[in-house]
Amino acid sequence: MLYTAARAVLRPLVWLLWKPRVSGREHVPAHGAAILAGNHLSLLDPLFAGVALPRRLTFVTKAEFFAGGNPAQRAVAWFLRAIGQLSISRGAGRGASDALADSLAVLKDGELFGIYPEGTRSRDGRLYRGRTGIAYLALTAGVPVVPMAVVGTDRIVRRGRILPSLHRVGVRFGPPVDLSAWAGQADKARARRAATDAIMDAIGALSGQERAPGYAPAPPEPPTTRTV
């Protein structure tokens, strides 16, 4: 219920301020499970994707946002949990496995699931190589993957500016990616790699971004304070 209430408040506000151009919404299934795979330029990307669609959209979010800290960070963590967003830890291990299981549960329930295959935001605007977890989810669940691209969100909040820019944003959805060549091969690394590359090609065709040859670099660690 909180997701519905938050969307009811945020959608008209986003439309008033940024007037997002939304195209290809007909490619997103009106019912049933599907994965929305997008590029990632800003922390605001999930907001624009969520208000562009009439259906609930669950995203996987890095675990740091759920960690709490100061009052503002705790409020963000509470809000993300309250609206049902999922947490994922960087790298392999139990945290990543739990996130995959939670993601499959969302799809099993017939919901829309959003993911950014690059694994982190692009700091230079290029589209980086996708992580193969997206292919594992799609091939295991047997659900369509709809490519998604946001354009302009990286220009809303810039370093050194106090107020956000009202630069217009685009949200684009494309036809589901044909993954039939790799159906039933979720356990094969080569199939996951090829399927992921096909998904990234579809995202790149929508976003028009320059392609980067490797994976997106991890964000810098926050500075630590030393005591003497």
Image (cartoon, helix red, strand yellow):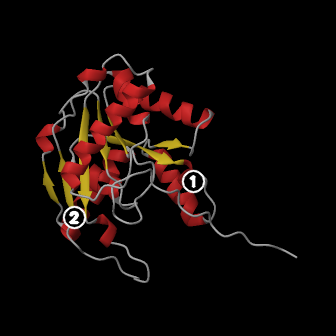
Measure the alpha-carbon separation of dots 1 and 2.
26 Å
Q: Secondary structure at mark 2?
A: loop
> Residue at (39%, 44%) from the top-left corner?
130
Q: Is residue 115 above or below residue 123?
A: above
Q: Tell whether 59 sits left or right of 94.
A: left
Q: Tell whether 48 sits left or right of 80.
A: left
> Residue at (51%, 35%) from the top-left corner?
99
CB under 8 Å between callouts 1 and 2? no
For the C terminus, the image quarter is: bottom right
Q: Amino acid at mark 2?
A: Val
Q: Amino acid at mark 1?
A: Glu
For the N terminus, the image quarter is: top left
Q: Residue furthest top?
A: 184
Q: Is residue 204 above or below residue 195?
A: below
Q: Tell whether 179 sits left or right of 72.
A: left
Disc 1 crowd rating (10 Å Cα; few below 14, some 14-19, many 20+) is some
Query: Which disc, if any, is residue 64?
Result: 1
Query: Which disc, if any, is residue 54?
Result: none
